[in-house]
Amino acid sequence: MVAVQVLPPDPPAAAGAAREPIADLPTVDFVYCYQSHYHRLVRALRLAGADSAAAEDAAQEAFARALVHWSRVSRGPNPTGYVYTAGFRLLAKAQRKAARRPPATAERNPPDPTGSAAASSVAIEAALAAMPPRRRSCAVMCLVVGLPVREAAEALGIAGGTVRKHLEDARRDLAAALA
């Protein structure tokens, strides 16, 4: 004969408190978003004028902020757009902060050649680097990342017409650089 031990039921949860899933673990959706968009976001931030370290810092911080609010972000219309918007805003904030600092004695780091295999890619990066910062940001958000004008305008905090004008100028600059 086998003795069976009967365990008491779990104690009831405190009144009004529901059992929450473990919030520290990322969901499958977040992991997929991170794996498929992290390097793309870093590349887009580099094309927007950031050096490698600043682009990676902004991308990591953007994903960290998205993870904290993932339950809300994932229910939104465009979770990856949220991450890209956060990344570009963090980059703009870092650039504003750097502009207030006195200039450093060393020159700006040259672009990383590992990301540009073709000559046209180098020409595009050079043309983007020569653009004014606002035009460059609009071009990267719309032409490289693929955000609609409305979302790019919202992310950059400017009007849609301003984004369209900067895109028109950016396309003209890119056409001249590639000709």
Image (cartoon, rainbow, N blue to C red):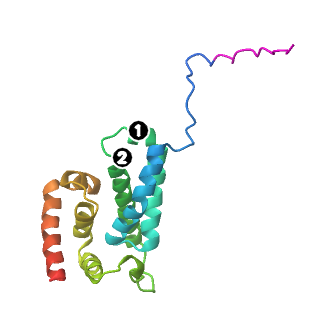
Q: Position of residue 87 (x, y in %)?
A: 38, 58
**Do tag 2 and tag 1 residues touch (Cβ < 8 Å)?**
no
Q: Quadrant of the C terminus?
A: bottom left
Residue at the image position 39 percent from the left and 42 percent from the top:
73
Q: Is residue 3 magenta?
A: yes
Residue at the image position 12 percent from the left and 74 percent from the top:
172
Q: Position of residue 19 (x, y in %)?
A: 57, 25
Majority secondary structure of magenta residues: loop
Instruction: State which quadrant residue 94 falls in.
Output: bottom left
Q: Position of residue 112 (x, y in %)?
A: 41, 80
| Lower position in the chain sequence, tag 2 or tag 1 | 1
Residue at the image position 27 percent from the left and 61 percent from the top:
141
Can you tell which of label 2 and label 1 is closer to the viewer?
A: 2
- Give the magenta range: 1-12
Position of 96 compared to 126: left or right? right
The amino acid type, in three-letter code, at marker 1 is Arg
The amino acid type, in three-letter code, at marker 2 is Pro
Position of 149 compared to 137: left or right? left
Q: Which residue is mark 1?
A: 72
Check residue 17 in the rendering and tell me which mark sits there, or answer none: none
Query: Foreground: 105 or 118?
Result: 118
* Crowd rating for badge 2 (residues with CA inside 10 Å; few <14, some 14–19, many 20+): some
Q: Quadrant of the N terminus?
A: top right
* Crowd rating for badge 1 (residues with CA inside 10 Å; few <14, some 14–19, many 20+): few
Q: Which residue is mark 2?
A: 79
Instruction: State which quadrant residue 110 falls in.
Output: bottom left
Residue at the image position 59 percent from the left and 16 percent from the top:
15
